[in-house]
């Protein structure tokens, strides 16, 4: 019974974390790129757009996750058709991770040597080519590390998904380990979470190492 | 002095060059300059403070020549070279490259024009995520050249710069000199008409510097590519520039044949640059811990070009006039293929004797300039 519960909760956690991290990158990477290239002196300087994006990202990052979870219930219902369950938990997880990813991507791209961008410009590269052939490839090792950080954060947030019946290891720890005084379940879930975090970080480190020449 | 010259005698066979052609001298009819700059101005605003980088700079660089721009840091030379391919927009003035006015082009046309202007950087600016091959292929890829042609062209260029065996290495696995070779190959890939080199050897050691300079010289000579080289080092100009512009405080102070500018500098800025090694030696001598003082007499800078260097000038003068001559600093060098020597000396004696000695040396073809 306990093993089955744990197994199911682990899968739910992996599912929520994986999908939310992936979706957050689909939106967060373009946002991070825009934050960089629209800034002063960059290839697509648009100060107003930069300021608007920066404000949106900051607002998104300042809302506590548990409040976001509840606040966007109508949006969640519109997207996945329900506001309860694992799939429903993925929507706020993704929304919360998007500004986080955007900032990490921005930081990674800003680390790219401006001289390299200048060299590409001097060869007649278009802004699109600068982004796709210079900024993103050059920042890839940092982006891989950033993705690991994001996944670990999403994993942490997913513990709160229980509030909307999302399931997962965090939820299990609260419901069984805490509320029903099942210390064994509590310890097992924590050990599993530690292993997951270690695995994600190790994968990120390995990817960054392979990508850094 | 004499011993120094004799040692280099074999290389002194080159004839004395003719009077220096001034930078403003028009080129033969019908030849258009590869680079023409007209009245470039640029001011940077940094936190309310204005820094003027370029003040009304005009220059012409002719097809096939190797043109140097020398100046101390902050003289505006880097801004100038970045204004040529408009990485920096000048506040005023116009830029032509290969007959096209770049300052009049829209973004798309400017990008196309930039593909005909190669640029080599002080810090190489290679893509770390790409191999040597990938870096050289980069400008061709973004220009949409077909894969097969990219391959052939890249291998041809890697052969030229001597890195064919490192095609699959990453920049982090290369030495500084090798990285700059990749940078040069990359700049040459789209077959540019002109190569802009921004301090191409300033991050390299002396030996690597001379190898890179030799490579640039060969590219200029054999491929006929016009070259514009920014540097703060006199040795770079001496080694590979046909003509040179001296910049100071955003202005071009002097333009001329490298030989004339180095042996007969007319502007204060050029004199400062040319005299810098001797000035350092002098400062060292006078300021030394052993309490040494400047040698007695007036200081002069003597420049010897060609046959006159084979004459024992100093001994002849000392024998002919009642003066003593103290050598403060000496140097034997080459400008391109023409060797030349410089001496900084203190001549002591009665004023009219010193004057006569100077006049006599001038009559023998030695350039004599009073040292400030």
Image: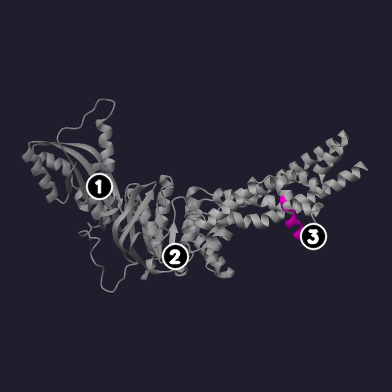
| Residue most extreme to the top | B290
Q: Which residues are magenta?
A: A71-79
- From the viewer's perspective, is B82 left or right of B148? left
Say which residue label 2 marks.
B114
Subunit bearing disc 1: B
Subunit bearing disc 3: A
Colouring method of the image: one colour
Mark pair 1, 2: CA separation: 41 Å
Which mark sits nearer the N-terminus, 1 or 2? 2
Provide residue B286's location: percent of width, then percent of height. 24, 31
Q: Nearer the viewer, residue B303 or B79?
A: B79
Mark 1 vs mark 3: tell me if same chain. Answer: no
For disc 3, the neighbor class at 10 Å (few under 14, some 14 to 19, many from 20) is few
Provide residue A26's location: percent of width, then percent of height. 67, 57
Say which residue label 1 marks.
B341
Say which residue label 3 marks.
A81
């Amino acid at each position: 019974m306990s093993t089955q519960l744990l197994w199911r909760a682990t899968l739910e956690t992996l599912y929520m974390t994986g999908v939310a991290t992936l979706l957050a990158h689909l939106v967060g990477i373009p946002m991070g790129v825009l934050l960089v290239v629209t800034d002063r002196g960059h290839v697509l300087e648009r100060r107003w757009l930069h300021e608007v994006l920066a404000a949106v990202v900051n607002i998104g990052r300042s809302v506590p996750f548990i409040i976001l979870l509840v606040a966007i219930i109508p949006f969640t219902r519109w997207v996945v058709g329900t506001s309860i369950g694992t799939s429903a938990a993925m929507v706020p997880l993704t929304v919360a991770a998007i500004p986080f990813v955007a900032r990490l991507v921005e930081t990674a791209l800003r680390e790219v040597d401006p001289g390299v961008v200048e060299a590409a410009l001097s060869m007649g590269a278009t802004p699109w080519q600068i982004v796709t052939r210079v900024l993103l490839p050059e920042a890839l090792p940092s982006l891989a590390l950033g993705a690991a950080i994001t996944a670990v954060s999403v994993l942490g947030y997913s513990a709160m998904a229980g509030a909307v019946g999302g399931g997962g290891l965090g939820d299990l720890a609260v419901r069984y380990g805490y509320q029903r005084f099942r210390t064994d379940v509590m310890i097992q879930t924590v050990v599993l979470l530690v292993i997951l975090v270690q695995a994600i970080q190790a994968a990120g480190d390995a990817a960054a190492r392979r990508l850094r020449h | 002095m004499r011993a120094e010259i004799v040692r280099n005698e074999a290389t002194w066979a080159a004839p004395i060059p003719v009077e220096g052609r001034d930078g403003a001298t028009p080129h033969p009819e019908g030849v258009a300059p590869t680079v023409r700059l007209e009245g470039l101005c640029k001011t940077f605003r940094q936190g309310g403070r204005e820094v003027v980088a370029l003040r009304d700079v005009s220059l012409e660089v002719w097809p096939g020549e190797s043109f140097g721009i020398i100046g101390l840091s902050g003289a505006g030379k880097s801004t100038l070279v970045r204004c040529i391919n408009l990485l920096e927009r000048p506040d005023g003035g116009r830029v032509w490259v290969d007959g096209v006015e770049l300052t009049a082009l829209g973004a798309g046309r400017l990008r196309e024009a930039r593909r005909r202007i190669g640029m080599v950087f002080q810090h190489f600016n290679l893509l770390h995520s790409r191999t040597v091959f990938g870096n050289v292929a980069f400008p061709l890829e973004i220009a949409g050249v077909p894969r097969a042609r990219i391959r052939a062209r890249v291998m041809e260029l890697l052969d030229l710069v001597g890195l064919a065996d490192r095609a699959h290495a990453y920049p982090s696995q290369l030495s500084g000199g090798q990285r700059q070779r990749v940078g040069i190959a990359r700049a040459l890939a789209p077959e540019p008409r002109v190569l802009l080199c921004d301090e191409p050897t300033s991050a390299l050691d002396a030996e690597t510097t001379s190898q890179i300079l030799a490579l640039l010289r060969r590219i200029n000579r054999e491929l006929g590519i016009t070259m514009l080289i920014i540097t703060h080092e006199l040795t770079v100009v001496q080694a590979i520039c046909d003509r040179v512009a001296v910049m100071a405080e955003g202005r071009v102070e002097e333009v001329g044949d490298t030989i004339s500018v180095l042996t007969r500098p007319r502007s204060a800025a050029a004199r400062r640059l040319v005299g810098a090694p001797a000035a350092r030696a002098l400062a060292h001598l006078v300021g030394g811990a052993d309490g040494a003082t400047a040698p007695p007499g007036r200081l002069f800078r003597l420049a010897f070009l060609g046959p006159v260097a084979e004459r024992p000038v100093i001994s002849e003068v000392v024998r002919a006039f009642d003066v003593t001559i103290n050598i403060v600093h000496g140097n034997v060098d080459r400008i391109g293929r023409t060797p030349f020597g410089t001496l900084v000396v203190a001549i002591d004696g009665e004023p009219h004797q010193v004057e006569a000695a100077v006049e006599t040396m001038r009559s023998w073809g030695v350039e004599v300039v009073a040292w400030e």
